[in-house]
Image (cartoon, rainbow, N blue to C red):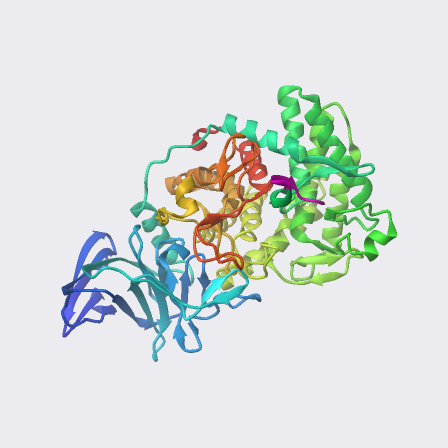
Amino acid sequence: MTTKMLWRKMDKNTCLFADDNLIAAIPGLDGCEDCLEELGEGAWRWTRHSAAPVDSMTLEIVQQDSMSYWMVPSVNYNGNGWGSGAQYFGYACEGTPWTYAWHRVAVPACTYAEGKSWGIGLFGEEEGGMSCSIRADEENRAVQALLWPEQEGPKVLFKRSWEPPFHGAMAPRQDFTGIIKLVPVTRPRAGYHEVLDFAWQYFARPLTMEKSPETVTRLDTLYFRSLWWKQFDGVTGFSSGMHWVESQAAFVKTEGFEIGWVGQNASVACLLLREYLRTGDEDLRNKAISVLDSWVRYAVLDNGLMLVKLRSDPKHLDSITNGDIPMVLDACNLGTAATYFFKAGKLAEQAGVPRPEYTKTAMGLCDFALRAQQESGEFAKSWFIDGSIDSRHGSVGAFMILPLFDAWQLTGERRYLDCALKAFAFYNGEFERTGYTTAGALDSNCIDKESAAPLLRAALKCYHATQEQRYAEAAEDIAYYLATWQWHYSTAFPEDSLAARIGYDTYGGTAVSAAHNAQDPYGLYYIPEYVELAELTHKKIWYDRARALWYNGIQLISDGTLVVNNRVRPAGSQDESVRHTRWGRMDKRIFVPSEWLPSWPGTFREVTLDMLDEWEVLR
């Protein structure tokens, strides 16, 4: 039976009814008229007309049901009640509700509030100029608001610090608009799925890719090759990236190597082996093998674990006492290492340089995972080199699930699959209870998107291993959570900003975490899963979202002549992030690229190309 939606004037208020049930009310304002234009089922463009021009305005909508869950997409998840450090906790600071500038939020100035039966999404138009706020009144009813002019407070989050509030100005005007989307709540913390679908269609636009996949691969390979170096006797690796050194007036490779996360040594080596098999370029093969051999020789520990970073010769005891060797081994690096050492073993065999020790290294990590798994199914976030737990909790442990499927397929031993399924049940159960995932962005300890990426990949691996539909359904739920971090619109940067001058487009990009509000191309990681979801669910929106992730993630890859901030970028390099909002270092610069050029975006691009059967979605 179809629910009849109706807006009625009641005294000064404009009220929304579903059949005869009062759902929400818009408090009236003297001298103003509120009009609701239907945009589709349960969606309206709300226009407030002021009889006289004004230089400030607040549009509020009050739900009538008690609030059970709320969200500011990519910024605040039900109060951000997990983690530490500077982030937006709760919906108020010392009694004053937080306000967020439109460009800080993945849908412009968007809030979402959910009661027992209904959820409401409220957001602004793409041109921006407004802010948003959400709070609970004395009856725990959600009060969502759009505010003009742009403002943030009562204090503003910068990088791991707080700065004074911001309050802009605007020329007096008479008309103000917002978008309301009403959705039925059939499952807790899931009503926002419909809001995101509507917003995606509302801001949809055709995309023209900056570069072809073939050009992207050529440039990524150039950069990977340039990052290879021999740092100390007998050990080679790929630098994590390049940064600008003023004294040398050049971009310089960073010291030290990392097996996964930012450094991605294992996956880069696999990608160069793939390119050798495709092109016959022996230099690529030799560089890849030298790096993988170095990690096996210097990083593998007797208990099956391995060091995740190399900065100096680990055979020298003073390297440990001087702190050059990290004593903490995290699940993100270890899970990535095992995944790509399995792959490296196969590629080395195909390349004519068999390395059974690569597979042995991966199996050692998987066997450690069997021993380290807790009764609940959880892995730790990180361990010390003796295998004892350093940090117990965090969804980032889901990275350890992925290579267990490889171990099961290689050996046929059910214990690896059972371990993977048990771990997925834990992490997905935690996600279903809370509505978020945690601790994937290793430079902060908070709610984020990176930790959901391996969980999404694991969900589909569980589905393929068991053919149970519940895993495909779980995958889509996780994908929607990841979509809360994806930009649905293009931020209109100030014309004099560096972001505007280089033509950066936020559309399709992703914010990092609740504590790290800059935008990066990490969404490249889960393009294959979005494409697969489009096929499994027959929903084109996942295909479109995947396409937008690629569009954003191939922007401003240097061809060797790109100049940004009067500095020529090395061929194949790309910024890690863009400060598309008020988030930055102590110099407080905003609307600028990071000018840190890591290898991982290129790695994720090339892994995506490897995983997709065809590249039409990327053209």
Is residue 142 rendered to the left or right of residue 412? left
* Above or below, comparing residue 172 to residue 143 in the picture: above
Q: Quadrant of the N terminus?
A: bottom left
* 371 is higher (above) or lower (below) than 58: above
Residue drawn at x 69%, y 60% is 374
In the displayed image of the protein, which residue is found farthest to the front?
247
Up the image or down, 100 lies above or below 346; here it is below
Residue 253 part of the magenta segment: yes
Give the residue displayed 68% in from the left and 34% down from the top. 269
Compared across the picture, whether 617 is left or right of 345 comes to left
Look at the image and give the residue range highlighted in magenta.
Answer: 248-256
Frontmost residue, 475 versus 510: 510
Locate the C terminus and report the quarter of the image it occupies: top left
| Residue 113 picture quarter | bottom left
Residue nearest the observer in this picture, 7 or 74: 74
Tell me, yes or no, if residue 507 can be seen here. no
Looking at this view, name the residue that lies furthest to the bottom: 138
Residue 504 x/y as whole percent: 42, 42
Instruction: Give yes or no for residue 490 being in the magenta stretch.
Output: no
Image coordinates of residue 523 in percent, x first then y, are 50, 45
Give the answer, above or below, for where 610 lies relative to 600.
above
Horizontal relation, residue 470 to residue 269: left or right: left
Residue at (76%, 56%) from the top-left corner?
Answer: 327
* Residue 446 seen in the figure: yes
Image spot of residue 576 (x, y percent): 54, 45
